[in-house]
Amino acid sequence: MNDLAAALHRALPALRVSADAADRVAYARDLWPRHHLDVRAGNVAEHRPGAIAWPESTADVQELVRWAARTRTPLVPFGAGSGVCAGVLPREDVVVVDLKRMARWRRFDPAAPSLDVEAGHMGVPLEDELNRRGFTLGHFPSSILCSTVGGWVAARSAGQASGYYGKIEDMVAALECVTGTGDVVTLRRRAHGPDLVPLVVGSEGTLAIVTSATLRLHPAPTSRGFASFTFGTVEAGWEAMRAIFQAGLRPAVCRLYDPFDAMIARRGAVKRERPARPGGGAREREHAPGRGTALLRSILRRPAALNGLLATRAGARAMGGAMLVLVFEGTDERPVRDAEEARRIAERLGATYDGEGAARRWLQHRYSISYRQAPALADGLFIDTMEVAATWSRLGALYDGVRRALGESVFVMAHFSHAYPDGCCIYFSFAGSAATDTPPGGWDEGCQRVYDATWQRALDAAIAAGGTLAHHHGVGRSKAPRLGPELGAGVGVVRALQRAFDPHGILNPGSLVPPVSPDPYMHHAPIRTPASREPA
Amino acid sequence: MNDLAAALHRALPALRVSADAADRVAYARDLWPRHHLDVRAGNVAEHRPGAIAWPESTADVQELVRWAARTRTPLVPFGAGSGVCAGVLPREDVVVVDLKRMARWRRFDPAAPSLDVEAGHMGVPLEDELNRRGFTLGHFPSSILCSTVGGWVAARSAGQASGYYGKIEDMVAALECVTGTGDVVTLRRRAHGPDLVPLVVGSEGTLAIVTSATLRLHPAPTSRGFASFTFGTVEAGWEAMRAIFQAGLRPAVCRLYDPFDAMIARRGAVKRERPARPGGGAREREHAPGRGTALLRSILRRPAALNGLLATRAGARAMGGAMLVLVFEGTDERPVRDAEEARRIAERLGATYDGEGAARRWLQHRYSISYRQAPALADGLFIDTMEVAATWSRLGALYDGVRRALGESVFVMAHFSHAYPDGCCIYFSFAGSAATDTPPGGWDEGCQRVYDATWQRALDAAIAAGGTLAHHHGVGRSKAPRLGPELGAGVGVVRALQRAFDPHGILNPGSLVPPVSPDPYMHHAPIRTPASREPA
């Protein structure tokens, strides 16, 4: 046991604490792909936390935070570690606070309907238990197998059915959290005065540690409507999405795949005929190690050229065009009627109707896609995703700008999900490699150089196009340095909030907002907003 | 010109400023009924502002705020003065900032669709202009004739069609505002990180002065579906509202009237057969002065007894039961289908279907009801409304508790509007009088004593029942002292935000949050939260 763990144990002997080597390596990371490259290069030491603590009650969290405030010990709240933006990236002097032992149901209100549940509850068991009672939360992030309620709230998560059920912030009716001074605050959604819940949702553990959330529930769906379409161009596809949402239709799932992503999705859907189970994705990886990697590698010989080809109408046609998948949910016949209404709108805008099959298959394999990165990473490539958003009128500029920026160095595909009446999210998937076969410093360093340059260019392009840095993966440490250019004086507001909630700066320092002094373990200097524009 | 106006004029000679006696009386108030009693008693001096300023640009507001920050002069932002909670209640040392000269359209984006409009734009001309372009904002507060965009945002307004279009906070995509340090901050709704827009929405001018808002628009409705129903009890009626919203239906208008309110509404609807026009209410008042007052007066001889009678099933039957009115809106045949679906649900829950008539009439006279208070006030009574909200599971306790508390001293009726899947707003209307015919201190003081005691009891009852203090009228100065009991430690969070946005405390001091030192012109001492629970 190291000094930090020993000090914590002396102060709070009843709290479960570990400084075992295995635990410290296991908690050294989330799923930030850049960190995978570090690990692949053998750098496992840098981000090991000093200790891990497992509180079992709000009182435990309160005690722990008060101790941390007294001793100025940074705390990193931890759910299931499936974030992809380095929201969790500890250091030797940090105590990771794993909340998974806080997973009790506190109050189930079938009338509202709502559930007050502790932050450490995992996604799939929660949804399964709600289904048994005839309800659904309606939140289905691809990470549902490896994410918690607290993680969803902290990162402002969006699920695959956000078109009908909304994002997590729409589901949160109240939050219990512990601020950086160890005060327990319950924030309830109210109809009057400032709404304080949206401050903590998305604050990525920097304002308070969420200990429980009262979540709005919905009747479990008993009927669905399906439809899928092909469009000649992705632009025609998103015009149909816009028309569908602006007509007041709310498909739970509305996903438009660009031609290459559509081709992959069709391949996947055809290959994986198997009943729906969240576990499906994980199993599949074991059964088919490295599948898809050879294809990606060959493609990556000439990313720029191929990206260019895919951008042409001929390329789009060759791959079968863009694919739109719709799934409506409900408890009566409206989902089927709404799917027909959506079909009328899409066909009026030039879509070819492909029947229900692709949409039904998508639903069967909804969790598979997220588990296909590891093999490629294992084979010396890097893969990542970038989700940005803009209003409909800026969507084209955002798509073209980010696609061009990424396309200079990596192979890019995209799909459009999480549509709203006034805008949409673009989800880019990209795969890259080192610039040469024998990069100085070795293969992984070569990959990291390309990776960093690619992200820098892509985020600049997103901001230049008037888009957002992120949509539902959060900001973390990987994008924090760019929050300034996007939020402007808003960063000053966030800093003022942090001073109010966490005066000692002990809560997940370095995530979300660039620290005022350069963060010792970020690779780029933080960007500051001019003091004159800061409200605080 | 007094010293304050003179100093302001010297500092900002280009700014339009007045200290005329007539202006100072005109801007001494909003529509807080208690203040009407003061005015009726001849107390017009107490709340006259020192001066009124009419900025014409964000730069003007910035200059004005910087001057106010330097000179520590309190500013009271002013829209159209139709608030009912003393959000506007100036003093001799205050400059009222009337924003109505800032009413330009800055950016109209038909694709999003959205409109960036300055804060001083009035409601009806805005909606009319949008309709001409084929759009609607979907925001129809009863005050639409006498309220502005900035006022809606500051008070977190709800319109009559909130069931489909949401409250104003759902319509705001971005806000430009000037903080208490004179910094111009633009806050945009983003998908990631903390959402800062909800901080300023509902902050009642205490965090920043809103100078423009980017509002989400909708296609103007081209089709509607209507339905109205009778229920034996109001409880049966709200169970139907709950079922309708939890089935995923979104009636733009969904209003349930308790038996007496229903009787009044039916009388009104029958009497006023005349084409829809926002002006209708105002005109009607001129044509029929004091109508309804005689009725109210006779009723008020025995409020408690009558309240008791109305609460019985026999009383409810005698008045024709509770009435539910539904209006669905859209651009295709779905509103009609959804009205049929709602009818199936309501009838399954014991409703008698009354056809479309009452709902169509309600829509025709949607703005009339708000203009019927003045005559009663003129005749020596007082009338007020109280809107509170709770989750469905607490609604019964909230209705019974507040109804009983009000009913001790005033005659109460209620309707239920602004329903959500998880809860609903209750809108109480009440009329009272002095306790005796010859009260000590005169009739108006007698009314004020009853008025203050009534509100005190009613707010205590709302909080005790787990309801909110308000739903869409705001908090203002009239309810600020009770924010503590409702928000708990949340008040500390709001105070911390105020310190961050307005370090000199010059923005509408005394509204929303009780001042830490007792407000010199409030009639009750402010309530503080224990420092130990304050996060700041």
Image (spheres, coloured by chain):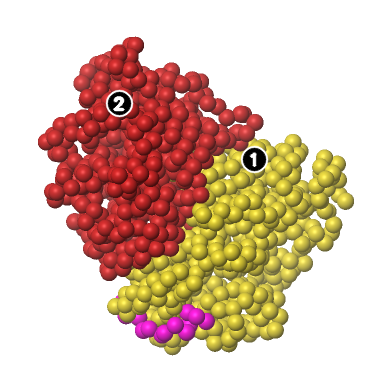
Chain colours: A yellow, B red
What is the quadrant of residue A345 in the picture?
Answer: bottom left
Q: How crowded is mark 1: few (under 14 residues within 10 Å), some or many (20 or more)?
A: many
Q: In the image, is residue A147 above or below residue A517?
A: below
The magenta stretch is A349-361
What is the quadrant of residue A135 in the picture?
Answer: bottom right
A448 or A36: nearer the eye? A36
B403 or A300: nearer the eye? B403
Q: In the image, is residue A89 above or below residue A505?
A: below
Q: Is mark 2 on a helix, strand or loop?
A: loop
Q: Disc 2 marks which residue? A: B301
Q: In the image, is residue A240 above or below residue A219?
A: below
Residue mark closest to the camera, 2 vs 1: 2
Q: In which quarter of the image is the C terminus of chain B?
A: top right
Q: Disc 1 marks which residue? A: A184
Residue, far right: A1
> Which residue lies at the image location 49% right of the left edge and 21% below the top edge?
B525
Question: Which amino acid type corresponds to the residue marked 2 in the rendered image?
Answer: Arg
Residue B96: image location, x then y, percent = 32, 27
